[in-house]
Amino acid sequence: MEITKKDIRALSKEELREFFSINDKAFRGNQVYEWLWSKGAHSFEDMTNLSKATRAMLEENFVINHIKVDQMQRSSDGTVKNAVRLHDGLVVESVLIPTNTRTTACVSSQVGCSLDCNFCATAQLKRMRNLNPDEIYDQVIAIDKESRLYHNRPLSNIVFMGMGEPLMNYNNVLKAIDMITSTEGLSMSPKRITVSTSGLPKMIKKLADDEVKFQLAVSLHSAIDSIRASIMPFSKNFPLVDLKESLQYWYAKTKSKVTYEYVVWKNINDNKESVDALVKFCKYVPCKVNLIEYNPIETEGEFQQASDEAIDAYISALAENGIVAKVRRSRGKDIDAACGQLANKS
Ligand code: SAH
């Protein structure tokens, strides 16, 4: 019977050292770790400072999984979307978003999504599985390479706003961020990384307890329970009082501002009551608001971008109350690479 070999990149440095302390000498664990991460080795053959016998022993016990960029699409605005094939054939998407001052990678954390936000294309895909830390890390590396190739600069920021709910793949997302920020990885400052959640109070508190150093964004979209539940049905189980309490806990522990993501839709939240509710919600913890442009997906017209006047009403009410709000125009719409459009269409 063939034994399925373990992906060696699922092991931490400590676990590798432990494996080698039994099979050889612990320091070999460091050497292999360096090959896997700093040098990006794709085969055990490449690890030339190990003996033939050690390489053969690794070959017998492990595989080295890597993602493969199956298809790359470039938008007229410079946005790049990768369709990424995983070792088991499943596909996720990641995006490179260049601006004058930044090049941002938008990465996926799950294959599909188990949440049911009615306005999001990814929600129409079933959640297949969580991504492993190396699969998240590899998306970042692929985008970093493209950033250097097409824009002559390394990646400056990462957002976990691709497919999936990062806080439902908590451990792997945190492990991937550890790698990204470590010297063996990209040495990126955690302040340049944003994890976006649909708002799971227990997990937000866990982030605070774990004293993470990255930024937190919450997809709010409405500060009125009944409206939020009608567009994000899962949120029925997570009322706004619990979200508010978890964010107060987050801020008390981390002193890090929260970003609220908010789309204004016609006949859904383009009314004064919604504006007032958001202003009130924003006073609970130091925050800023990103008003995201709606990217149409196939929903039979249920969701339409609100008028400019409706957006202006939000901007002026927030400004009057000293809350920073920015309007975020979409990028990469022509290749279905914008927020909420990732659905493996290609
Ligand atoms: N599950 C996480 C991250 C993925 S979604 C979360 O909910 O935050 C990334 C962002 O895109 C979220 O703010 C989400 O609400 C938003 N989004 C989803 N569909 C969208 C659409 N069609 N147009 C604009 N933004 C959308």
Image (cartoon, rainbow, N blue to C red):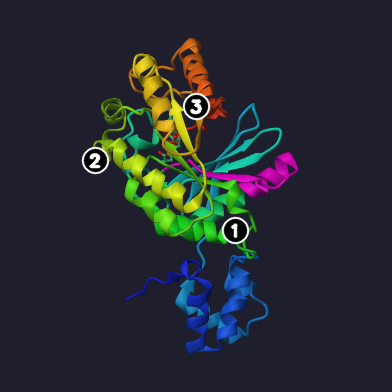
For the residue pair 212 and 32, the one nearer the viewer reads as: 212
Find ligand 1 in the image and state its quadrant: top left
Q: Is residue 161 left or right of residue 153?
A: left
Residue 151 falls within the magenta-colored stretch:
yes
**For residue 234, side relative to residue 257 (left or right):** left
CB at disc 2 and ligand 1 closer than 8 Å? no
Residue 207: percent from left, percent from top: 42, 54
Is residue 96 visible in the rendered image? The answer is: yes
The secondary structure type at the circle numbered 1 is helix
What amino acid is labelled 1 in the image? Answer: Thr
Mark 3 lies on residue = 292
Q: Residues within 10 Å of mark 2 (few under 14, many from 20)?
A: few
Q: Amino acid type of disc 3?
A: Ile
Q: As rendered, which of 76 and 206 lies closer to the eye? A: 206
Please tell me whether mark 2 sits on a helix, a strand or a loop. Answer: helix
Q: What residue is shown with label 1?
A: 181
Residue ID for mark 2: 237
Name which residue lies at 63% across and 54% down: 188
Q: Position of residue 215 (x, y in %)?
A: 52, 46
